[in-house]
Amino acid sequence: MSARARLRAVVPAPLPPSQAGPPEITGRPGHRMLVQRCDDEVVARALDDTFAARPGPGIRFPAPWPRRRGTWELAPDASLAVFAGVHAVRAVEPSGVVRWEVRHGCWYGACRDAHESYAEYADRRDHRYPESGSVGFSADGRLVWAHVRGPLPGGEPSPDTVDEWLVIDAGRGHVLARADAEAAAAGSFHFPHPADPHQMGLSIGEGQDGAPLRWGRWDGNALAVDCLDDDLCLLHLSPSGDRLMTVSHDQGSLAVRDSGGAVVAGLEWDAEAAVPPHPGAPTDDEDGPGACWDWAGGFLDETTLLVSTTESDDEWGQGRHWLVDTTESGGPVPVGYPLPVSGEPTALGGGAWTTLSPGRDVLHVWELDGPEG
């Protein structure tokens, strides 16, 4: 039994791959955007329901520093781009006007300088490969949640704080709340609750040291942070926001959890037990490395997951993608494609997902075409 994928759209990247990072499709159904970042700018184009670019030149946001010196996020209405850099979080309008900036500690671990500008360390060799934080907009676009390295100019919550989690007014740049993230990150990702702008997930990577998973709730005054786990990667939220898709830091276990971090009964899968050997793997290689889940995929709808094992499949041939119907007990089933695909899938919601072409210049948008025997 397998699931067939049907090609729904082919979306060319707005920028050449030699100059930019991979293109992405962001936003909810009806509010899709094609976005891509190069060193100088972020380019955004609105997409219609067929994933075709809407008429017009698109929107361009000048970038304050090169793309390898931090992360970025676009507001849901594409009115603002927020850049999480080495020394500051900066909000930039399409005109290039800086709406606001929040400075913080330096993400290069050995540096204790309070930088005021990117130019201070742009040419320093020791700042070439810093750690990084991230930012995320709330579902309504009114809040920016920012994971930063302390201290802020106003001081730290406590002397033991390394990383801070901030809630910022997206319009004015005022820090509304702050809390200890209880981590020392190499990188992180934000996951906004799709219905409640006062809730946010934060998946933190500490390299080999762990993967702290945090869940934040802002009540309009204080930020409460739940430490769900210290060795768990959050990959996606269901459309309701009530379920979390997670993979263990060692990539062995895939699970669906509630917002408190508890595994939903029966919804946990061990990669080596659930995934059959790759067709290209030698049959007598009993001691070789087994399958592992990628840190990729997500919810296609409230009860259907799309996952992949491309990292562990790579040695033997074509990477595999898997569909998991959480209302049944059959486990993952392979996804069959009408043409070769490369890399990991990215779930868009609304039953759609994307894969990136081998040349990294085209996104293929897929949807399910029913089961096949």
Image: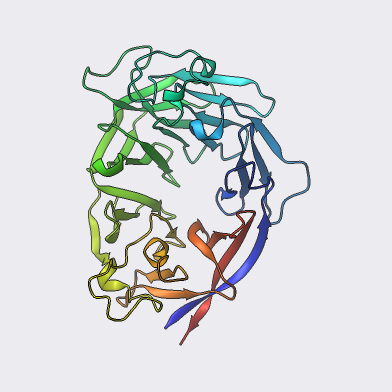
On screen, residue 152 versus residue 348, left or right, reads left
Residue 306 in sight in this render = no
Picture residue at 40% right of the left edge, 66% below the top: 315
Where is residue 274 drawn, in percent x and y?
Answer: 29, 72
For this orientation, the residue located farthest to the right is 56
Residue 112 in which image quadrant: top left
Where is residue 207 drawn, in percent x and y?
Answer: 31, 41
Total tally of numbered discs in the picture: 0
Q: Is residue 114 above or below residue 275?
A: above
Residue 190 in which image quadrant: top left
Relative to the observer, which residue lies in front, 142 or 363? Answer: 363
Residue 217 in sight in this render = yes
Where is residue 255 drawn, in percent x and y?
Answer: 29, 60
Picture residue at 78% right of the left edge, 43% below the top: 56
Please state, as top left, top right, bottom left or bottom right, where the N terminus lies in the image. bottom left
On screen, residue 181 versus residue 66, left or right, reads left
